Amino acid sequence: MATGGPNAATITVPETLALLDGQFASVARGVAEDRYVLWLGSGISFGRVDGLRQVIAKVLEFLRVRTNPGDPNCRFGKALRAALELAPITPAEAARIDLAQPFATWPDGNEIVARLCNNYARLLDINVEGEPDDYLLWEAVDLRATFADPAKPPDVEHLCLAILVLEGACSDLASANWDGLIEGAIAAMTGGQPALSVCARPEDLRNPAPRGRLIKFHGCAFLATLNEAAYRRFLVARQSQINGWAAWPENAAVRVRLADLVATKPTLMIGLSAQDANIQALFAQAAVQMPWRWPSNPPSYVFSANELGWDQQGLLQNVYRQDMTPGNRQQIVDEARIQAYAKPLLLALVLHLLCSKVRALVDLAPGAMPAADRQSLRDGVMALRNQVAASVAPDPLTFINAFIDQWGRSLHLFRNGSLTHAAGRYQPLTVESIANIAINPGLPASGLRETAVAAGLIGYGVSRGEWLIDAPASNAVRDGMFRLHAPSGEAKVFLTSGPTSALQLKQDGHVVDAEEPIVIHGHKLVPAMARSPRAAPGRTGRRVVREASLASLLESSATLDELFQRFRMELAI
C-alpha cells in the first residue's frame, strides 16, 4: 500500500483546506453542490460514545459478574466461555483468568479485547439461554444508556454535519451508528425546528425531509428507547442480522433507497470501515444496477482515511470491476483517499462550503466590475477563510461552538437587526446548495450579494495590509459582528441587509453615534439615516455612525480600485 502525503491523524484544518483547494477540489465542489451522500460510521463519534473496545469489555464484564463459577451449566458462564472461544484464548491465558476479579484487571484483557474486535458481531450473536436474541446488545451493552443518553453533547463532527445539512449541502446521509448525536446537534442549532428526517425503519422513508434525510440502516438507539415496540427489532449488531440484512423482506424498502443513492450520487465515507458484509453487498448490488466509471469528476467513491483498509479496497474492486486493472489499481486507491480523519475534514468542508457560497455571491452581485476584479474579491473572501481556519487549533470543539454562535448571531442581526426572535444557535447563509443559489427568487432582495462583496473588500484590505480584523470584544450585540483595526484607528462593524435591520439596530440602542461604529449596508441607504460625510480617510472629529451602502458603491464603481477607494472613504478608517 502506498504511503506519503499528510497524516490523517495529525493534519491541520489549514492543511486539509489546501487538499480541498487542490487535489480534492472537485470533491469539495461536489459537497457544496449536494452531490455526495455522506456514509458515516463510528469514527465520527469517538470520544462521545463507547467505541468497539469499550463495548466488548462491557459485554465480557456483564457476563462475568453473572457467572456462577461452581455451576458448569450456568447460562452466563456458558455464554462467557463462548465469548472467550471467539477470541480465542490460549491455554496459558485461560489459566490466568480469575472470575472473581473484574475483567478490567485481567492480565490478558487488552489482548482478548483486541482479538474480539474483528469478531464483535459474532460476540453479540451469542445467545444467553432464556433471553431474547438481542439480549447482549440491549442489556449487556446497555444500548439505551450508552448510545441514547440525551445529556451527551455533540462533538465537532456532529456539529459540522449539522451545518452541512442546514446549508443545503448534505440532503442525504447514511449511518451505521446507533447514537443520536447528529440529530441532537441539529435540534440545538435550529431551536428544535424540523430540519432532519431520521429513518430507522422502512415506514420512516415516508416522512418529509425538510433539509435532509438520515438513514440509520443499523437502527437508532434513541428511537428504540422512545418506542421499543416499533424500533428495537431494527437494531442491527449481530452477525446473523448482518448476514441476513440483504435478504430480509422487512429491510427491502431501505435497501432499495440506499442502493439508489449509491447508484445516483457519489459516496463520501467518513469514519466507516465498510467491513460489514451487508455494506459490501449493498455497494456491489448498486454497481450491478448502474456502475460508476473510473475516472470521474468528481470522484465516485472517496474515503476519509490515512490508508484504505482491506474492506475499503475490496469495495473499490467491486464497484470499479470494469475499470480496475493491475496497472491502475494503486492510482484508483490513492485518488479515493483523503488523508484527513473526520474532525479536520468536516471542519475544513464547513469552512470551504461557506467560503464558496460567499464567493459565488460575489460573482452574482450587480455591477459592471470585470471578472478579474471579481476574482480579487473572491481571493479576499478566501483570505478571511484562511484566517478563521488558522484559529481552529488548539481546541476544535471550543472553536466550532464559538463559530456557530458568532455566525448565527451575525446573520440574525444582518437579517433582522435583533436577536429577539432568534430561533436556535445557527442561521444558514442560504438553505439551498451552492448550485441553486442563483435561482432563489428572494436573492436580489436579501442583500447577500452586496454583503458578499463587502466581505471580499474587507479580505482584500487585509491582504493589502490596510487593516486587520478580529472577533468582537464580547457577545453583546453592541460590540458588533467583528472589529476592524487600521493605522488611523479601530471600529466595531455591523453588517445589515438593508434599512429595516439597520433601523432596528439603532432603535434597540446597539448602534450608538458616540461609539463611531461602522454599519455596512447591503442595500441603499434611506434618507432617514444620515450618511457619513464623504471626507478624506481618517477621523474628522465628528462622532457619528459611519455607514456605507454596497449597492450604491457597486452602482457607481466600474473597477475594483474605484470600489475599494470609495469603500475606504465611506468607512473613514
Image (cartoon, rainbow, N blue to C red):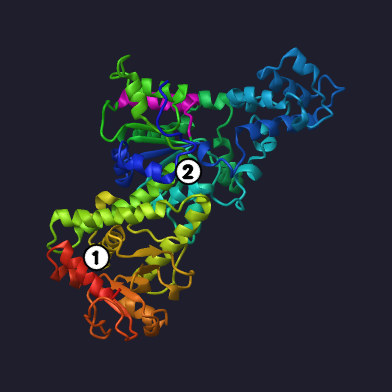
Left or right: 192, with 38 as reference point: right
Residue 312, compared with residue 229, is above or below; it is: above
Residue 71: horizontal and vertical position, in percent? 85, 22
Left or right: 129, with 446 as reference point: right
The region drawn magenta spans 272-290
Residue 334 shows in this picture: yes
Which quadrant would residue 541 be assigned to in this image?
A: bottom left
- The question of residue 1 being in magenta is answered with no
Q: Which residue is mark 2?
A: 343
Residue 213 shows in this picture: no
- The question of residue 276 being in magenta is answered with yes
Q: Which residue is mark 1?
A: 450
**Tag count in the figure?**
2
Front-most of 101 and 130?
101
Residue 250: horizontal and vertical position, in percent? 48, 32
Residue at the spot 47% in from the left edge and 26% down from the top edge: 278
Lower position in the chain sequence, tag 1 or tag 2: 2
Residue 520: horizontal and vertical position, in percent? 30, 72
Q: Marks 1 and 2, Cα distance to the nearest angstrom?
A: 33 Å
**Image quarter hosting the C terminus:** bottom left
Residue at the spot 32% in from the left edge and 45% down from the top edge: 34
Amino acid at dot 2: Lys
Residue 565: horizontal and vertical position, in percent? 20, 69
**Image quarter hosting the N terminus:** top left
Callout 1 secondary element: helix
Left or right: 77, with 472 as reference point: right
Farthest residue, direction right: 70
